[in-house]
Amino acid sequence: MRLPLTVLAASLLLANAGISYAADTRIPDATVKAAEQLRDKALTDDTGYKIVTSLTTEVGPRIAGGVNDARGRAWAIAKFKELGYDKVYTEAVTYPLWQRRSEHGAIVAPFAQPLALTALGFSAGTPQGGLTAEVVKFDSLDALKAADPSSVKGKIVYIGFRMTRQKDGHDYGMGSAIRTGGPAIASGKGAAGFILRSAGTDEHSRTPHTGVTIFKDPTQAIPAAALSNPDADQLERVIAYGKPVSVRLDLDCGITGTFTGANVIGEITGRKHPDQIVDIGGHLDSWDLGTGAIDDGAGVAIAMAAGKLIHDMPQRPDRTVRVIAFANEEMGLFGGIAYANKHAGEVAKHQLGTESDFGSGPVWRMSASVKPEARAAIAQIAGVLAPLGVAYDETRPGGGGSDLSQMHGKGMAALSLTQDGTIYFDYHHNANDTLDKIDPKELAQNVAVYAAFAYMAADAKGDFGSAPDAFKKDGAGE
């Protein structure tokens, strides 16, 4: 049998390293050919776009525990059934219920004017009538950490880190760290409130970006909000005058109890090994400012459409393809954690998995965390994905995506399928996250990637190395 060049290269790498495996995981030639046909069909199929159109039109924004939470779950159950999935069910997920009711902000002195801002998830509300305090500015999270508490006590902390557009979105690492960790650090130093420049890359729109913040002790929560980029610029110009600057926050929000939602799951049953699973998915919840199209209606649509196309193949793969529409990713991966905890005992049966949660830009890079004996099979997958513009980076681990990172942390072999996120953070977590931001052709490329990889993984001869704690070496679960 003549090996594809990508597989031959992977085999030579192993041989040159002095490593020999008697039972390498491989994907049969017939499966590779079928996956190529599936890939090409997906590129001209509009199922994914129809799904995300349906979700954003018929349900709209889906903040966890909000008025559309139950509607979103009912939609997902009905959509899985409409698409012909063999098995559709839910698994309960319980989490704190945070609610946003109203939000306002303004510079009070020295130059009074309103601010476009939005409360962060798990922010405390302000006292009745609002909170007015002097602003203290820090250039970085490290500067806040090093600050003398006396310089912070009773004030509103502001951090102005500005994200830039990057293909892999790496600036979000710092932007999200400031948003998630900054308010708790400020609270620990006695701050009355916290504001930040939005973790977003849109420069000219007064659309603040929300997102979760984390207080290990909810009783220590303080009011926390994000400014739009133009409003952060304005605040910094006022601060530059060198006079004391006061801001008023009026946030009506907070935790009001607990809520039980659910992960919604659809399965395409495997032909020979129905109890062995390939996991794909997206998260069903979204923030409340837009309609949750790119975050993460697109991911749900990509995974659902991929499963549908696999369902329609002339021959099912050997293993089950499981599509999970996760609950409440936005407020802290609650759906992913619940799924991983429930299924940890059967992690060895989870063949390979990854989640789509970075919009709908084209997938351009693949990486994997698998056992060494499965690298040749990953190279076969890479060969099928290469015509779609997907490059295989053998030097990087695969994380599984946001929610499925939790299952990876339990030992599930995982891919990372990195999408082009150059403009993703223009719309992420803000009111402009709407359907018009999705390019149908780019979405179809994503569906083609997910359908082809899932089909091949589900039909592989051999496994990819899932086992309890199998991937701690690459930091899985940290």
Image (cartoon, rainbow, N blue to C red):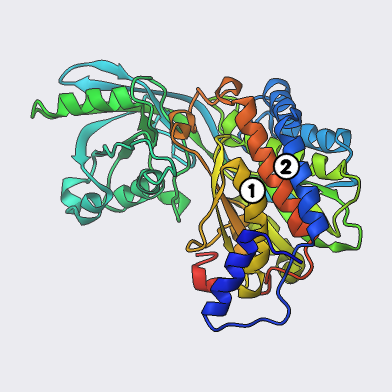
Density class for disc 1 (Cα within 10 Å; few <14, some 14-19, many ≥20) is many
Between 294 and 336, the one lying in front of the other is 294
Density class for disc 2 (Cα within 10 Å; few <14, some 14-19, many ≥20) is many
Q: Is residue 325 visible?
A: no
Image position, residue 439 (x, y; %): 59, 25
Q: Report which residue position mark 1 lands on.
A: 385
Residue 83 picture quarter: top right
Between 450 and 20, the one lying in front of the other is 20
Is residue 307 rendered to the left or right of residue 435? right
Q: Residue at x 67, y 33 (%)?
A: 444
Q: Is residue 34 visible?
A: yes
Count of marks overlaid on the render: 2
The amino acid sitting under disc 1 is Leu
Q: Residue furthest front?
A: 2
Earlier along the polypeptide chain: callout 2 or callout 1? 2
Q: Residue at x 88, y 53 (%)?
A: 269
Is residue 389 rendered to the left or right of residue 319? left
Q: Report which residue position mark 2 lands on.
A: 39
Classify 138 as above or below 119: below
Residue 305 picture quarter: top right
Image position, residue 257 (x, y; %): 61, 43
The amino acid sitting under disc 2 is Arg
Between 86 and 209, the one lying in front of the other is 86
Quadrant for the N terminus in the image? bottom right
Image position, residue 401 (x, y; %): 58, 51
Q: Are marks 2 and 1 in contact (CB under 8 Å)?
A: yes
Q: Residue furthest left?
A: 242
